[in-house]
Amino acid sequence: MFFLHFIKFLAIINAYGYLCLGISGDKGLIIGMWKPALIFTVTEIPRSPANYYNNVSKSLTPSSVPLTSISSDPKNNVVFASIGDSIFAFQNFTIWQNESSASFSVAFKGKSIPLGQIAFDYISNNLYWCDSPLNWIAMKPAYVDNITIYKIIVYTDLKQPEGIALDPEDGLMFFSDNEPKSRIQKASMDGKNRSVIVYTSLIRILVLSVDATNNLLYWADIGRQTLEVSNYDGSNRLVLRRNNNVDVIGLHYSQNMLHTVSAGSRVLFGVDTISGSELYNVEVTEAQPFTVHVYDAEVSNSYNDSCSTHSCQHMCVNSPTGATCLCAEDYKLSSDAMTCTEHSLFYEKGFIVSNATAFTMLNVHSVNGQQDTIKYLSVPSVSIEAFAVDTNLHLIYFVDSNSNTLKELSIVTRQTRTLASILSARDLVFDWIGNLLRWIDLSQSNIQVFTINSGTISTIYSGLEQPVSLTVDAHNGYLFWIPGTSTKSNLQGNWNGSAHGIIVSSANLDNPSSLHYDVTSHRIYWLDNSRIKSSMINGFDIKTYNRNTFGATMTIVYKVDINGAYYTFTFF
């Protein structure tokens, strides 16, 4: 967790032109800065060139902490900031940052640190954020202290989401995802009714902002170095301004102006949204400006809050069709469409481990430091040798070495049933495409398959050299394993038992173990002595990762991104 240390000071930013006297009231610009980390406020909203802009700064400790996005709720004097792996709420905020009763709290912990905008729904009081490495968009009630009350609302067909903007009055959400090709999508604020509105001539969209009055969407393309605008349906797209050699990574629309910042160029500048002309340009010397947000406590919007009369147990959003109740992760909406009931003992997304008689699940947010309750599912009178999971049907398949049987456990009902008798098994893997279970039979040195639909067992490969560490590429029908001989290599076969071959020879390996196929990167990962290595499924492009895993017996790679960043869980 990052701890915030406040240091106040006033500074003067030199620009050009004349003095802008500002507008009375609690309004101005909030700028999040890096290197060192600062919350920097300009105590007015610039509209034209000026010699001076008063500003106030508060430093963050440690100074290296990444502050990536800011949003606000001026009617309640609250500012939200994405700092490191958490979203903080700063209460009793003023643009002068001089309120003695100001405080801060953690609104959510467990957000991935890399880039990803946050946005506040000022009607329903919900907080939204993009999690780029985990490839999802999530939300939670902003003022509910329980950080486990959140919901992932967009996660399918989404890769590297980074920009998000809301129009709460129309019940709409806009977001960008940037891999493999950048695009901008629109959806209801519950994540439903998705449609792609812009998908051509985009490189990378980090930030979005809306003009809710005129139904216009603005964005900055850091690759094309442009500021652009379109209607909410993507029509009438226009390049508002080309920023030669200036990479805009933060912008916010307000009253016919775009306020923007560039970390590389260290500038804050404003653009007229009618003409595209630059209205002011300020050099920022204190640190690298990374995000900008207009804070205006004087703005008074008239709107209908359909959620105010809707008694949702967990959370409510204003969708285009009216109030919609949502339930937190691992809960489902009851028949009354308002209350929530636990869907199953385990989390909707997480990591399952076992000992001999129980399964335990960690929430996927544990990779980012969120502390959640560890959930246990005991299975008495068994000895769990190996297991695999069907996430769609909420089933755990496992080998019981006490009875030498293959069994099925329902996570929802917690009931167990026997599927088949077997001789021995290790490295059980589930093929969700063919609805098959495969494992290594050590007693006969072969690989067997159980067809779940028919309940039959057959042998795929026999006479192998003590195979270990089975993994599967279900989409392409490939199996991978390591022969347990002194000369070890990584082998590849097929689900139908056709000829198998070496993909990584012993010359490129020391002591490989724990093969794992990652469906995101289409690569095979394994432990090799005290390092993690990977290759393409044909054995090409072998990589070694600089992470010491001395003593580890198993590793799982989770959600590898386009740059090769990944989460690993190692077991000792």
Image (cartoon, grey):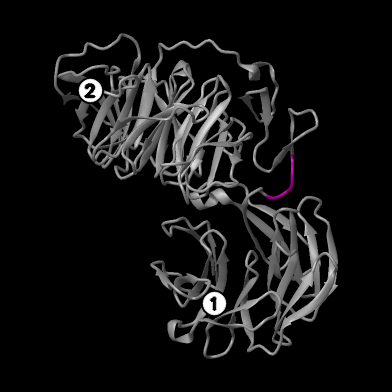
Q: Specify the label residue 513 is tagged with.
A: 1
Can residue 80 be seen here? The reply is no
Q: Residue at x 66, y 30 (%)?
A: 314
Name the quarter where the C terminus is drawn: bottom right
Tell me which label, 1 or 2, sits earlier in the chain.
2
Task: Tell me the element at label 1.
Answer: strand
Q: Which residue is drawn at 75% across and 57% down?
A: 395
Q: Which residue is drawn at 33% across and 41% down?
A: 224
Of residues 221 and 342, the one drawn nearer to the viewer in this rendering: 221
Q: What stretch is highlighted in magenta?
A: 342-346
Q: Residue at x 38, y 67 (%)?
A: 546
Q: State yes or no: discs 1 and 2 in contact (Cβ < 8 Å).
A: no
The crowd level at tag 1 (other Cα within 10 Å; few <14, some 14-19, many 20+) is many
Task: Tell me the element at label 2.
Answer: strand
Can residue 174 be seen here? The reply is yes
Of residues 193 and 436, the one drawn nearer to the viewer in this rendering: 193
Residue 326: image quadrant is top right
